[in-house]
Image (spheres, grey):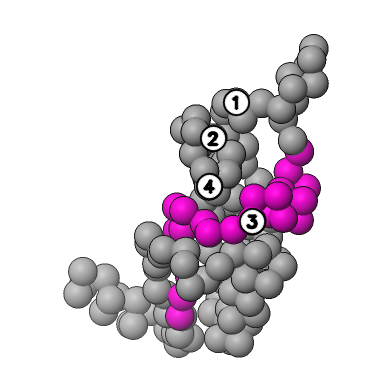
Amino acid sequence: MFDGICLYQLVVDEQHLKQHLGIPTLLEEETGVIRCDLPTYVMWPKGLRVQGRPRPPGSAKGRYCFQLRGSLIKAANQGEHNRYGKNPLEILAVLDELATSWGIDPFRTPINNLELSMTWPVAGGKCCQSVFCCI
């Protein structure tokens, strides 16, 4: 099952994502000028880490480059934990929310890291001892 995911260059409408996640526009305190050169900001909706980094000056793609990483299982559990396996349909629901609500283009966003996991019930300690012996 898919668990951890790292997307370093989200293909997303910057204004839509900022509005959807409630990311404030950074302003100069004295003049009210929008600041796009300030340090990154981080949000943790449903346990996923969203980070916006300023793009180099003159970039035509927008002011920020967004990254997302975290556990899809944790997101399916509303940010509580990622200890237990989930129904694959619940993971698909999280991916669907990222595409529809957040506006991430799943066909153009490259996947940088993908963690696969498996959970199975264990009766007694023999299975765990065998796994540790194989490592």
What's the magenta region?
Answer: 1-24
Residue 88 versus residue 110 in the image, above or below: below
Tell whether label 2 touches label 1 (CB within 8 Å).
Answer: yes
Give, as a three-letter code, the residue at label 2. Answer: Pro
Tag 3, which secondary structure? Answer: loop
> Which comes before the other along the chain, label 4 or label 3?
3
Q: Mark 2 or mark 4, which is nearer to you?
A: 4
The residue under label 2 is 54
The foreground one among 128 and 87 is: 87
* Residue 119 visible somewhere in the drawing: yes
The label number, if any, that marks residue 61 in the structure image:
4
Tag 1, which secondary structure? Answer: loop
Q: In the image, is residue 102 part of the stretch drawn in magenta?
A: no
Tag 4, which secondary structure? Answer: loop
Residue under the image location 59 percent in, 74 percent down: 95
Q: x%, y% of residue 93?
A: 65, 79
The label number, if any, that marks residue 13 in the structure image:
3
